[in-house]
Image (tube, rainbow, N blue to C red):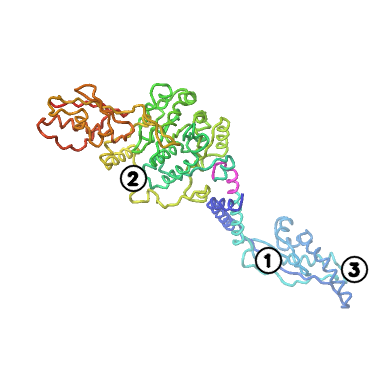
Amino acid sequence: MDLREYIRILHKNWLLISAMTLLGLLGGAIVSVIDTPQYQARMQLYVSIRNETQASDNLVQGSTFVKQSVQSYANILSSEIVLAPVMEELGISGTVTALADRVTASIPLNTSIIEVQAIDQNPVRAAEIANAAGKSLTNVVQDQLEAGDSPDVASPVKLTTVQTALVPRDPFSPRLELNLAVGLLLGMIAGITIAALRTLLDTRVRTLQDIEQITDAPMLGGIPFDDTVKSRPLIVQADSRHPRAESFRKLRTNLSFIAANENSDSRGRSFVISSATPGEGKSTTTSNLAIALAETGARVALIDADLRLPKIAEYMGIEGGAGLSEVLIGRASASDVLQRWGANQLFVMPAGRIPPNPSELLGSGAMAALLDLLHTHFDYVLIDTPPLLLVTDATVAAQHTNGVILVVASGATRRPEFDMAVKTLNAAGGALRGFIVTKLPTKGPDSEAYGFGHGTYYGAASSRPDAAPTADPVATRRARRAEDRRHRPRRQRETQDPHPLDTPAPSYSEPAMPPHDDATTTAALTLRDPAADTPARTPREQVSDTVAPTLLDQVTVTAPSTQSVQIALPAQLKPLQRRELRRENRERSRDHREQPLTQAPKQRPRASDRRGGSRHGRAMAEIEAPQ
């Protein structure tokens, strides 16, 4: 770890470190309060040599002797020979050892002074013990240890009291400042140690470096954490200005770059989206990514291949009774269960009924054929599958797609689990195209750990005055669709794009589309009695009464009999033109029925909101002449 990583650890655990520091301060204060006050008194003795001649040589020798002997005198202060008279004089109960712990002697550097200290709970008793101990030490040294040759001869060593012990005013311990400082230091050290251990023992994915140690796949995007994800799973559709919705648009852009690879020609832009464990947000990520891709005008197929615990139908608010499982067992076709969602080219295939053998169905030839069909007719195919570590569904489905995109939840996915998922995918021969990190923290040190800053340029949805309140997602989607239909132009409401499986497949190499099998749209028209027309008119002239003039040059007229003609409109024309032909046929027919032959034709009324033709683009309309 570098210096930046250590700073991040301190920044992330600042609350823990602060708490431990405060606990250390509190501990020091508690010790100072509960500790019994102790008072210290001290007195000083000066050690010298008696020299009556005052010769210089004798002075030097005496000074040297004192310096060598003063330490020995200080050491015998705690002996029984010195302290026993003190206990007897002051009436102190207990043992000599207990008193020796309270009486000490020290020698200042390069001096001949013995400093005697005594500690006691009573300040007066402390001064008495110090003075008595110094007096007893003087008697022992002069009368016993360094006594003269005879009782009449004085000891050559002399101990003189320099300063007697005074009664102390302030207690020697506890020292409040010292205890607080020691508690502060110990608490800070303990907090930093716990923070370091917590970081080292934490196996959850926290930074981009944690993922880079496992795989070389690129990071496609980061989705910030949103506590309203359960009430608003489709944030791209619910609130397009939300920072989380903008993150899916960034993911959409990055996905377009990895879509072009060695498998693009054979497997199209199809991706399996999975995760290592449940609860990492793969289903909501797949749904929002599909909506974001459809916003660009691309044709997107969203497949719920989680045949064990499907969620796509619930999130998208569609009927999930029939879906992928029915297609794989041959009970329904893909065009029957693909449901269009929203105003864009997004089609959703729910999971359908939960089968007893999901892995076998996803690895069957029917699944491969279905994906080949979807690769041909859609720009993107997104497949939501179960987690990799639980079942083999994702690895089986990945064999027929362009690759796998793994979803990793920041702070939830553990590194060993993610590592095992990558190894499982590699062992099965699947291609890991990238990973998406979800639940990114928007605040704190971990918010920049992946290189994705999540600012508040758009503002949080809850802080804007025009933000929609949290509501039922199904009701919200229905209200939004009704509003889109209300504001949509009339001509656009009257038209409906054909089903993608009934239209020519897109080509990524050539702009031209191959012709559809149904090359023409045919309408049968019954002509009026030729005797009623004076002069006689050709079939094409009579067809002009029914067909719009703008479309007359693009139709083919055949006359199988004198009473009817067949008109054929090329399929390469836009759906709007084909529907305009059918609509004007109905309106002109209505005019001919309502007015006599002698009256001039009425002006064409406003276009009706009714739609003509079936979903497969074929229209057969028979117009009878008025009698």
Q: Whole-Å distance between the Cαs marked 1 and 2?
A: 76 Å
Marks 2 and 3, how far apart at CA: 108 Å
Label 2–label 3 contact, CB within 8 A: no
Q: Say which amino acid is labelled 2.
A: Pro
Could you say where residue 291 lies in the image, as x and y percent from the top left? 39, 39
Residue 182's image quarter?
Answer: bottom right
Callout 2: helix, strand or loop?
A: loop
Q: Is residue 367 above or below residue 93?
A: above
Image check: 42 left or right of 230?
right
Disc 1 versus disc 2: nearer the observer: 2
Could you tell me residue 157's position as x and y percent? 83, 70
Magenta residues, dominant SS class: helix
Identify the residue shown where x is 31% and y is 39%.
Answer: 481
On screen, residue 520 versus residue 351, left or right, reads left
Question: Reading the chain from its start, which is encountered first: label 1 or label 3?
Answer: 1
SS for callout 3: loop
Nearer to us in this view, 361 or 126: 361
* Rendering coords of residue 538 (x, y %): 19, 28
Question: Seen from this angle, which residue lies furthest front?
Answer: 535
On the image, numbered disc 2 is attached to which residue?
A: 469
Q: Is 496 in front, or is 282?
A: 496
Considering depth in this image, is 13 or 329 the residue closer to the camera?
Answer: 329
Residues in magenta, as a range: 194-206
Q: Is residue 467 visible?
A: yes
Up-down relation of residue 281 to residue 350 (above or below):
below
State which mark lies toward you, 2 or 3. 2
Q: Earlier in the sequence, mark 2 or mark 3?
A: 3
Q: Give the residue pinned by disc 1.
A: 41
How many tags in the picture? 3
Q: Which residue is mark 3?
A: 149
In the rendering, at what x and y percent does residue 530 appear?
15, 25
Viewer-proximal residue among 248 and 309: 248
